[in-house]
Image (cartoon, grey):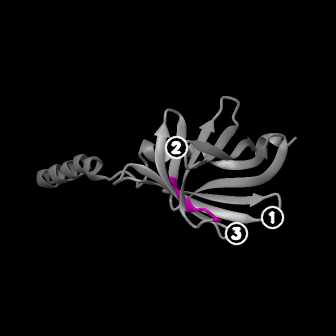
Amino acid sequence: MNPSLAIGVLALAIALPASAAEPPCSGSEYHQFDFWIGRWEVYSGDKLVGENRIERISQGCALLETWRNARGIEGRSINAYDAPSKRWRQFWAGGDGGVLRLEGGLVGAEMVLEGTSPDAATGRDVAQRITYTPLPDGTMRQHWQAADGKGGWTTSFDGSYRRAEALQP
């Protein structure tokens, strides 16, 4: 082999790993919400209130939530890590006409997302906060709160997510 060609091939082989870019959305921050991925049955106390499926989409850059409550009303959310702002963002659209925009991130092991939505009675924006907590037994808690107008929060929903796969015999 020509010595010049050999040096060129060697230089190319050395340069490739350094210039090869990581796949998009491969950083650890894009996986902070992975504990939510799966098929779930959702309970409020002992009552089954719906089912939820969370899956990776867009080459792993986003999560798609597909919700169906016990009355058959559906909703979807898109969840993605926004690298420039270093925040998670969620956009929810419900079959009941409800829309919710949230953003936030990990607080300890919990994903905490906050935003506003219009109050049905007054039309005024009300602060909302949803906290997703993975639990040691493989379940997850979703605690949705709304501002009470007095500096505190009231619970809108407190649900227990149980993996649907785990419930199969």
Picture coordinates of residue 76, whole percent (x, y): 64, 63
Is tag 3's residue or tag 1's residue first in the polypeptide sequence? Answer: 1
Is tag 2's residue or tag 1's residue first in the polypeptide sequence? Answer: 1
Q: Which residue is drawn at 29% across and 47% down?
A: 17
> What stretch of residues is rendered in magenta?
115-121
Vertical side of 117 occupied by 113: above or below: above
Q: Toward the viewer: 48 or 10?
A: 48
Instruction: Determine the CA span between mark 3 and mark 1.
Output: 9 Å
Horizontal arrangement in the rendering, residue 8 relative to residue 69 (left or right): left
Picture coordinates of residue 111, whole percent (x, y): 53, 42
Q: Could you say whether the residue bearing mark 3 is in a helix, strand or loop?
A: loop
Q: Do the residues labelled 3 and 1 touch (CB within 8 Å)?
A: no
Answer whether residue 116 is magenta in the image. Answer: yes
Q: Could you say whether the residue bearing mark 2 is in a helix, strand or loop?
A: loop
Vertical side of 81 occupied by 94: above or below: below
Picture coordinates of residue 49, whole percent (x, y): 80, 51
Q: Could you say whether the residue bearing mark 1 is in a helix, strand or loop?
A: loop
Is tag 2's residue or tag 3's residue first in the polypeptide sequence? Answer: 3
Which numbered marker is on residue 72? 1
- Residue 105 visible? The answer is yes
Q: Toward the viewer: 13 or 127?
A: 127
Answer whether residue 67 is magenta in the image. Answer: no
Q: Which residue is drawn at 51% across and 62% down?
A: 58
Residue matched to label 2:
151
Residue matched to label 3:
95
